[in-house]
Image (tube, helix red, strand yellow):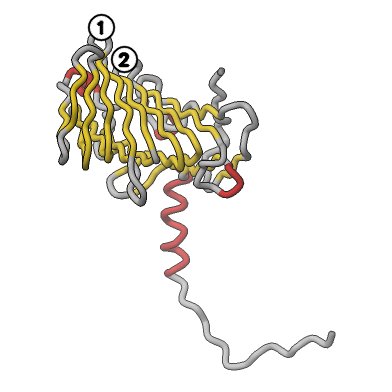
Amino acid sequence: MMPIPLPKHQRYTPVFLPKLAGAALALAGLLAMAGAPARAEKADHLMPLNIASQKGGSVDVANQRTEFLGDVVLSRGSLVLRAERIDLRETGDGYYQANASGKTGKQVSFRQARDVPGEAIEGFADALEYDTRSDSVRFLGNAVVRRTQGNKVADEVTGAVIVYDNRSEIFTAEGGATSPHPSGRVRVVLMPRGAAAAEAAIAPQAASAVPLQPSVTLPPRKPL
């Protein structure tokens, strides 16, 4: 499945993309268009993996698998994953694969800081797969992934399945029955950037500087 970069002219919001039959839409460059290249916190992969749960869990020593239940929090540096249940498996070469699932009314959540100050990647889905070897996150079912700047959403992708490659910073989104968008579509919102963003910020101020002029008379109605 080859990545398909977004054309450079698609820099405005909203952008609606149809459901792709038997294929995925790779949103290459979604974050790169924000300016200088940046990655998630580079130190995160050097940090230990920490897991805390409310109901404890069970350990399968033979298969190197551990199940955690009840308000589970997995953290690694700036990365924080919250779920109702996490099944963690250690590979023979020391990497980890985490399968997380939520519960009715409460999805799995994911957040990780980027190297750009104040920016982060955050996402929500019914289930989630996190692989430390490929440094990728797979959001499954009613998936929403955002790039945030402080408290503001800079970009947003929704779909049935969204895969985020942390190394290349490429989103791959697929439509389907579990997409939160009607008709199973993939939906992308890209906020204006650079000069376009500055113009968008000035426009509301300029409009508010001109007060509305009330009229005491209505224009005559044109005959039908």
Q: Can residue 193 be seen in this view?
A: no
Q: Position of residue 47 (x, y in %)?
A: 16, 21
Q: How crowded is mark 1: few (under 14 residues within 10 Å), some or many (20 or more)?
A: few
Q: With respect to residue 219, does 47 lie above or below? A: above
* Left or right for 124, reference 220: left
Q: Give the residue number, with chain letter if any, for mark 2.
A: 133
185 with respect to 203 (left or right): right
Helix, strand or loop at mark 1: loop
State the CA–CA distance, disc 2 to disc 1.
9 Å
Q: Dot 2, how many residues are within 10 Å of its Cα: few (below 14), some (14-19), or many (20+)?
A: few
Kindly identify which residue carries mark 1: 93
Residue displayed at 83% across by 87% down: 223
Q: Nearer the viewer, residue 115 or 52?
A: 52
Residue at 18% across / 22% down in the picture? Answer: 59
x then y, percent, for residue 30: 46, 32
* Quarter in which the N terminus is drawn: top right
Residue drawn at x 52%, y 27% is 26
Q: Which of 94 and 57 is in front in this view?
A: 57
Residue sitting farthest toward the top: 93
Q: At which x and y percent is residue 197?
A: 44, 46
Where, by quadrant of the figure, is residue 2 drawn?
top right
SS class, disc 2: loop
Amino acid bearing label 2: Arg
Kindly report which numbered mark, 2 or 1, lies closer to the viewer in this rendering: 1
Is the residue under label 1 in contact with that under label 2 (CB below 8 Å)? yes
- Which residue: 56% across, 29% down? 25
Please state the horizontal and vertical placement of residue 27, each as a whole percent of the image. 50, 30
Q: Nearer the viewer, residue 119 or 208?
A: 119
Q: Compared to 98, does 188 lie above or below?
A: below
Left or right, 208 with respect to 222, comes to left
Three-letter amino acid code of the residue under disc 1: Asp
